[in-house]
Amino acid sequence: MTNTTTAIDTARRIAAPVGMLGGGFMLDPSVLGAGKEAGYPNGFVYYVVGRGGVLGDVHADVVVSAFGFFAPDLVSKMWNAQVESPRAAADRYTAGCQEWGRTRLAGWSGAARLADLLATVVDRADPTGLALFAGWRAQARPADAEGRCYQLLHVLRELRGCAHIVAVLANGLTPLQAVLSNPTGGPETAQRFGWTGELPPVDRASFDAAEDLTNTMMAGHLSVLGAGELAELGDLVEAAAKHAFGN
């Protein structure tokens, strides 16, 4: 089996657990509490400004382009409700990310090794066209293994998310169509993401093609690891998810 084939298999294998793990902290009450203390009107505003704050002091359209699957009006409204500088929000949100990881990965022996493998992948990834990933990669990482490992899991999630936006557009789907065509999405998800009005038709075939392209793109980033390291990465990501969520 070639390393390229192994990388594609690993990309498919870790897609779901990385998505679940890396996004686990985002709207968790333990993380959003810091936003409330800082004066944010609600948790979703804090999420948008904290997550998008790595892009810097930019116009809302820049954040809309990076978030991809959310309705532009909703993202703009949330971004423009910021109560501190985007950089301060990003650093606050990053601290929440790290602490969530310390709590969920506490006592897990694989954190340091997984952090090393993740760092190899994300630090060698080409950030061209992947602005939100690039912004999160640049965030300072903590010294402790659990906090660093979890932050890097989130960075890897942002890498895949950015690649997925590219793949969706390359397959002729609009962001809203992608939300509707995703088996885990649908009209309720679209509404939660701020979309209103008439809904376009579902195009599952194009969405599946976008998923395949996303995994191919991720395989390119993962191929900096050897075959043995890729297998180890898959094992550790799955073990981290099991430890963090207790199943």
Image (tube, grey):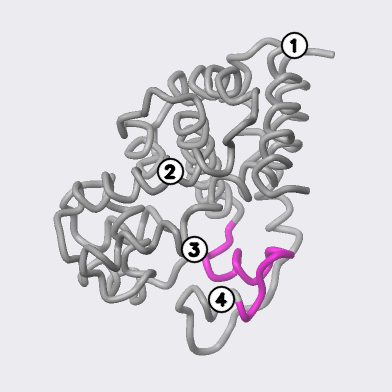
Identify whether 79 is placed above or below 73.
above
Q: Earlier in the sequence, mark 4 or mark 3?
A: 3
Q: Percent x, y for residue 136? A: 36, 39
In the image, is 206 to the left or to the right of 55? right
Residue position marked by numbered label 3 in the rendering: 69
How many angstroms separate mark 4 from mark 2 (CA)? 30 Å
Secondary structure under the numbered disc 4 in the rendered image: helix
Q: Tell me if label 1 and label 4 are in contact, CB under 8 Å.
A: no
Q: Amino acid at mark 3?
A: Phe
Secondary structure under the numbered disc 1 in the rendered image: helix
Q: Which residues are magenta?
A: 172-188
Q: Percent x, y for residue 84? A: 15, 59
- Circle 1 crowding by C-alpha within 10 Å: few under 14, some 14–19, many from 20: few
Secondary structure under the numbered disc 2 in the rendered image: helix
Q: Earlier in the sequence, mark 4 or mark 2?
A: 2
Q: What label sits on residue 99 in the rendered view?
A: 2
Q: Nearer the viewer, mark 2 or mark 3?
A: 2
In the image, is 197 to the left or to the right of 16? left
Q: Earlier in the sequence, mark 2 or mark 3?
A: 3
Q: Tell me if label 1 and label 2 are in contact, CB under 8 Å.
A: no
In the image, is 193 to the left or to the right of 137? right
How many angstroms separate mark 1 from mark 2 (CA)? 30 Å
Q: Amino acid at mark 2?
A: Glu
Q: Percent x, y for residue 49? A: 29, 59
At a point 46% along the width and 36% down the height, the residue shown is 151
Q: What label sits on residue 228 in the rendered view?
A: 1
At a point 66% along the width and 33% down the height, the residue shown is 216
Q: Tell me if label 4 and label 3 are in contact, CB under 8 Å.
A: no
